[in-house]
Amino acid sequence: MKKQVLISSFQFCILLIGFLLGSTVILVPGSHANQNAWLAYVIGWLGGFLLFSIYIALYKRHPEKTLVEIHQLLLGKWLGNLLSILYIWYFLHLGSLVLRNFTEYTLTISLPETPLWFMTVLYTLVIAYSVKSGLEVTSRTAELIVPFIFLFQIGITLLLVPHMKFSNLLPFLEDGLKPVLDASFSVLTFPFGETVVFLMLFPYLNDRKKLKRNFIISFLLAGGLLLIAVFREITILGELGIERKIFPPHLSTKKIEVLNFDPLIGVMFFITGATKICVCYLASVIGLAQLTKSNDHRVFVYPIGIILAGLSIWIYASAPQMLSWAIEVWPYYSIPFQIVIPIALLCISLLKGKKKSKKASS
Amino acid sequence: MFMVIVIIFAILALTLFDLPFLFKKKNPLATFTYYFLILIGIFIAYINIQDLPVASPAIYIEKLIDLIIRR
C-alpha cells in the first residue's frame, strides 16, 4: 500500500538528527565511564551505525512496509500483532521518558515553583497539535528549527574553549576497558538504538533510494555534534562533574562570563526533545491505526496524549530515580526491542526469501 | 474528589470531538481501542490526582529485568 503522506530526504535527515540529539543535549551519554566517556561514546556511535544498518536492511527487504506490517507479514496475525502492541508500548514509554526529562529539566533549572503536571500538560498540548497535524507538518517544523541546534551547540562550545582543561581527559583507561564497554553499551541503546522507531516512518520517505545516504549524513552530523558536547563537558567539568551532576551542560554553560547562555540549553532541549517525542508519538498512533485497520492515525492522538502525559508523571517518583533508571535499567530493557527482535526479523525474512527462491527455481 | 470528577468529565467531554470520525468510519475495533485507551488514561489520571501508592510500570520492568539478569 502506497503511503499518502511523504517527506523529503532533507526532512527525514532533520527528523533523525533532532531525534538523536533529543535528551542527550542535557545529559552526557556514557557519563559513567568518567573521563573515558568520549571513548565509550565513540564505540556506542559505531555500534549505532551497525544497528541502524540492520534496520535499513530489514526495511529494504520489505519496502513500503512499517514495522507493524513487517510483523504481520513475517510472524503472522497473532504473534505479529502481539509484538506490535509491545513496540507501541515501547515507543510510548520512550516518549514519556523524554517528556519527563523535559519537565524535570524545566522545573529544576528554570521554573522551580511550577507544578510538574502543568508543564507536562502544556508540553503535551504542543506536541499533540503537531502530531495531529501529521508527519509532514512535524517534519516541516523540525526543518525550520532543528538547524539552530548546530549554531547553538557550536557557539556555546567556542565560548567555553578558554575554560577547557584537557588534563581532565587523563588518566586514559585507568580501570581498563570494561567500564568503557559497559558505558558504550548504554550509549548504543540511548540514543542510537532508539532509532528503531524510524522503522515506522521509513515508508513515508519520498526518495527511498537515498535512505542509506540520509542515514549516514544524519548519524555523522548528530553524532559529531554530540561528540563535541561530550568532550566539552569532560574537559570543563571533569570526571566527577559529569558523573555526579544531574544536568552537566547546564553547569558548564554557567561558566561563560559575558552573557547568561544557560537558557539556550533549555531552548535546544525544547526543540530536540519535542522532535523526539513527536516521532515516538507518531510511531505509536500510526502503529495503532494500522493495527486497528483505521485509515487515519489522527483519531488516536487524543487518547495516546492523555496516556503519554499521565505516564510521564506516574512513571518516576523523582528526577534521580528517572536518571538512575535510564542508566541502569533502560539498556537491558531495550535489548529485545532494539537488537534481538530486529535481527530475528531480518533472519526470518532472509530464510523466507531463500525458501521462496528455492520454490521458484524448482 | 471534586478534582477527580472534573478531570474525568473533561477527558470524556473532549472525546466528543473524535466521535463524528469514529461513527463515520464504522470500525468497531478502532472505536473499542479508542475507548479502551481513554479508560487507561482516566485510570492513570486518577492515580496521579489521588497520589495513590500504585507501583508504576517502570518498577515492574526493573523487577523483571533484575529477575532475568539476576543483578
Image (spheres, coloured by chain):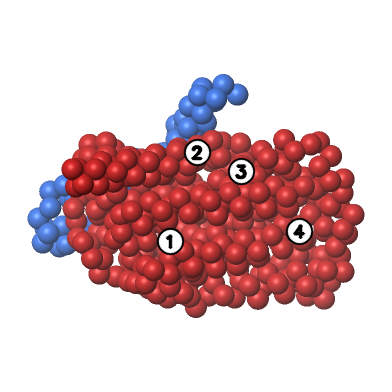
Chain colours: A red, B blue
**Residue that mark 1 sits on:** A278
User: Quadrant where the C terminus of chain A lies?
Assistant: top left
Check if mark 2 and mark 1 are on a common chain. Answer: yes
Return the chain for callout 1.
Answer: A
- How many neighbours does mark 2 have within 10 angstroms: few (below 14), some (14-19), or many (20 or more)? some
Q: Up-down: is B69 above or below A359?
A: above
Q: Residue at x 33, y 62 (%)?
A: A203
User: N-terminal of the two: label 4 or label 2?
Assistant: 4
What mark, if any, has residue B46 been given in the picture? none
Look at label 2 and name its amino acid.
Ile
Left or right, B48 with respect to A244, comes to left
**Label 4 vs label 3: CA separation?**
18 Å
Residue depth check, mark 4 versus mark 1: number of the one nearer the observer: 4
- How many neighbours does mark 3 have within 10 angstroms: few (below 14), some (14-19), or many (20 or more)? many
**Residue that mark 3 sits on:** A186
- Residue A305: in sight, yes or no? no
**Label 2 vs label 1: CA separation?**
23 Å
Q: Up-down: is A352 above or below A11?
A: above
Q: Residue at x 41, y 53 (%)?
A: A57
Check if mark 4 and mark 1 are on a common chain. Answer: yes
Mark 4 in CB contact with mark 3 (< 8 angstroms)? no
Look at label 4 and name its amino acid.
Phe
- How many neighbours does mark 4 have within 10 angstroms: few (below 14), some (14-19), or many (20 or more)? many
User: Quadrant where the N terminus of chain A lies?
Assistant: bottom left
Look at label 3 and name its amino acid.
Ser
**Residue that mark 4 sits on:** A231
Return the chain for callout 2.
Answer: A
Mark 4 in CB contact with mark 1 (< 8 angstroms)? no
Q: Residue at x 55, y 68 (%)?
A: A217
- Residue A324, picture quadrant: top right
